[in-house]
Amino acid sequence: MVMGTGSDVGKSLLVAGLCRAFARRGLRVRPFKPQNMSNNAAVVPGGGEIGRAQALQARACGVAPTVHMNPVLLKPQTETGAQVILRGAVLGAMRAREYQQRRGTLMPAVLESFRQLAAEADLVIVEGAGSASEVNLRAGDIANMGFAEAADLPVVLVGDIDRGGVIAAVVGTCAVLPPAERARIRGFVINKFRGDPSLFDDGLAAVVRHTGLAALGVVPWFAAAARLPAEDALALPGIAERPGAAIRVAVPMLARIANFDDLDPLRLEPDVSVRMVPPGSALPGDADLVVLPGSKSTIADLAFLRAQGWDIDLEAHRRRGGWILGLCGGFQMLGQRLDDPEGTEGPSGSVAGLGLLKVDTVLHGAKTLSEVSGTHPATGTPVRGYEMHIGRTRGPGLARPLLDLDGRPEGAVSVCGRVMGTYVHGIFAEDRFRAAFLSAIRVRGESGLAYEAEVEAVLDELADHLAGHLDLDRLLALAAEV
């Protein structure tokens, strides 16, 4: 089990790289994360959703993702509450205190999912959540040491040297844990080192001296990680713009932004610059395309959008001849009205939409979770992706659909053709559609970007990177001790 001294120390990326490295040795490898908190989710074959990071880790293993790889997924809807997903399906919405009191009851389901994966694998690599040192959250814990003890797992601790204080973080984590839990930690990894790793030899020695743990390696900064899907919104402010790009894309950073990996193929295009616009900043006047991303709390995020003045910026963008694409929650916002009669995503109520598409949405009913494929009729290019939403959209705007999903019209396009909305996530991963869509905005040549092949290449590069800096044989030996 890979645990961290804190959040965002690189656990998800390390697990993905280890999955690919050990799978290339011929082992049957599976990823597992007992509890994840993220609004960046993926739909698995047959329906159900898990954290995006676990879907990427499954890909690194060369297997299809399943709901058992991330049995508990928390999708924040407010500052104090989240939608709880159990084995891919909605269990309900809970406030933080209620979930903290009830999470222990989910342990049997979590362990059963783990056992199912273990039965089909030579090696299961488990990822912890947040920090292993959160002893104040230990009661009922299913994410870190609580799970490690229940499944009887050895633990490797990861510290992030880029944020500073890594010696204290590793030593301090060990210091606050009870002796039995401390004994589960067999070694440590220092991640995100910039420069010559040998310069930290004295630091490694200090950690070993204070903890007695095995030093498993110092992993240098892996810049290519920016080309892989990110786990959560912590990564969004770090997305760099591309000066001088031919096509400029602006994306307002909604408070509950979801499934923002939709943007990854766009930001990898060499002639496209994706700008994540933070709260308090105006949407740039020189943008060619504004993408309204998905949201976990559509009505609340629509109010947030208006509070930033982005609705005014969006209308000005449209009048200048700019293009607008709404994805899932963003599609719902572009309509004339949103109704949440049952309080599905927050307090019940009804609000006016942005009025840029002639559709209305009611948030009710079962959650749609499905993989889809079809065509983009305007260009004849293929599309594929997944739907993950609550709500039903109706209205005359649907008479001009954006997509044809094997005979089912989907989405909407305005009369002018420059305002569009769809429920389908992941459509930009299809190279031919992405090229045609961008060429409609601005005449351009083929970039040659093959997105799926790029992800595979980076996973191989990551596995090579870890193999060069970690003691993989020692790690495998630790797993064999179980």
Image: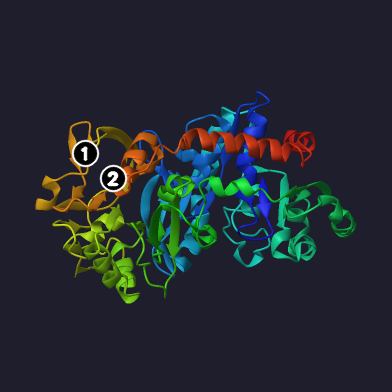
The reply to whether residue 332 is in sight is yes
Q: Is residue 470 left or right of residue 76?
A: right
The residue that label 2 is drawn on is 440
For label 1, the crowd category at 10 Å Cα-Cα, with few meaning under 14, some 14 to 19 and many 20 or more, is few
- Depth check: give the residue in front, 159 or 132: 159
Considering the numbered disc 2 on the image, is that residue within a helix, a strand or a loop?
Answer: helix
In which quadrant will I find the N terminus? top right
Asked where in the image residue 291 lies, by quadrant, the reply is bottom left
- Depth check: give the residue in front, 270 or 231: 270
Q: How is the image coloured?
A: rainbow
Q: Amino acid at mark 1?
A: Ala
For label 2, the crowd category at 10 Å Cα-Cα, with few meaning under 14, some 14 to 19 and many 20 or more, is few
> Where residue 387 sits in the image (x, y, percent)?
31, 44
Considering the numbered disc 1 on the image, is that residue within a helix, a strand or a loop?
Answer: loop
Residue drawn at x 17%, y 57% is 357
Q: Amino acid at mark 2?
A: Ala
